[in-house]
Image (cartoon, rainbow, N blue to C red):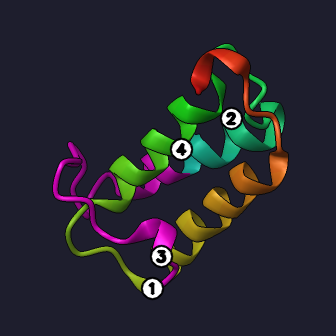
Amino acid sequence: MNETLERDATITSPYTPRNVDAAIGHLERVLSAEGANSLFGQTYWRTRVRQVSATRGLQRDQRARLERLMKLLADSGCVQAFER
């Protein structure tokens, strides 16, 4: 598993296996359209991906989709000054 998606004990997920696909789909749509350049910034989106990743019972394909999102955020290189 990609180390960026290791379970963080401080992050809890409000999602269940029943609604996690919708959450992942939302992140994919927003990040493909806006990247990390949205109003919320890269730190916000990284936290959201980690939050969804904390969902218990994720399937392999769901985890792979989340790993792609983390890679997209890492590759975007648009860290804003106020996020340091």
- Quadrant assignment, res 80: top right
Q: Earlier in the sequence, mark 2 or mark 1?
A: 2
| Amino acid tagged 4 | Arg
Q: Which residue is mark 3?
A: 3
Q: CA distance from mark 3 to mark 4?
A: 13 Å
Is 6 situated left or right of 57 in this image?
right
Say whether residue 4 is magenta: yes
Secondary structure type for disc 3 = helix
Secondary structure type for disc 2 = helix
Q: CA distance from mark 1 to mark 3?
A: 15 Å
Q: Earlier in the sequence, mark 4 or mark 2?
A: 2
Contact, mark 4 vs mark 2 (Cβ under 8 Å): no
Q: Is residue 40 visible?
A: no
- In the picture shown, does residue 29 fall above or below 75? above
Q: CA distance from mark 1 to mark 4?
A: 20 Å
Say which residue appears at 28% left-offset and 67% top-offset: 7
Q: Which residue is mark 4?
A: 46
Which residue is nearer to you in this view: 84 or 33?
A: 84
Extent of the magenta region: 1-24
Q: CA distance from mark 4 to mark 2?
A: 12 Å
